[in-house]
Amino acid sequence: MTIAAILAGKGGTVFSLSPKATLQEAARELHARRVGALMVVDAAGAPVGIQSERDTVRLVAEEGGAALARPVDAVMTRTLVTASR
């Protein structure tokens, strides 16, 4: 299976949020967009990380509901792997 084939089925729209958004805001956006991850972009729109459902669940499991007030940039995955179609 190629990336192009996956995108043909899922669509190529990438949803993003600010590194200063809270995990609560990220969770709401993940739910509203029905996606498993959001690209984290700086003020210029450059990617700086990715915030996934897994990142959020892991932190809430470790720290409890108060973790939802933390900023995304405190827990996002910073190492990005990219590929072309």
Image (cartoon, rainbow, N blue to C red):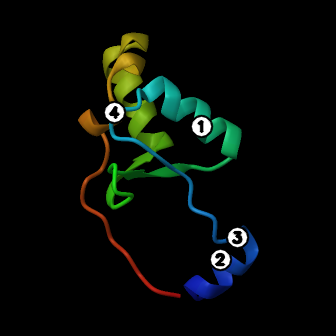
Q: Is residue 85 above or below residue 34?
A: below
Residue 44 located left or right of residue 37: left
Write down the residue under mark 3: 11
Q: Residues within 10 Å of mark 4 (few under 14, many from 20)?
A: some
The x and y percentages for residue 13 are 63, 65
Q: Residues within 10 Å of mark 3 (few under 14, many from 20)?
A: few
Write down the residue under mark 4: 20
Residue 51 located left or right of residue 31: left
* In-front residue for pair 56/19: 19
Q: Amino acid at mark 2?
A: Leu
Question: Whole-Å distance between the Cαs marked 2 and 4?
Answer: 28 Å
Q: Amino acid at mark 3?
A: Gly
Q: Is residue 33 above or below residue 5?
A: above
The x and y percentages for residue 11 are 70, 70
Residue 79 located left or right of residue 34: left
Question: Whole-Å distance between the Cαs marked 2 and 3?
Answer: 5 Å
Q: Earlier in the sequence, mark 3 or mark 4?
A: 3
Q: Is residue 73 above or below residue 13?
A: above
The x and y percentages for residue 29 are 59, 37
Q: Earlier in the sequence, mark 2 or mark 4?
A: 2
Q: Is residue 68 above or below residue 15?
A: above
Is the C-beta separation of discs 2 and 3 under 8 Å?
Answer: yes
Write down the residue under mark 2: 7
Q: Secondary structure at mark 1?
A: helix
Q: Which mark is residue 29?
A: 1
Question: Whole-Å distance between the Cαs marked 4 and 1?
Answer: 14 Å
Q: Residue at x 57, y 49 (%)?
A: 36
The x and y percentages for residue 72 are 35, 35
Q: Residue at x 30, y 50 (%)?
A: 77
Q: Secondary structure at mark 3?
A: loop
Q: Amino acid at mark 4?
A: Lys
* In-front residue for pair 58/69: 69
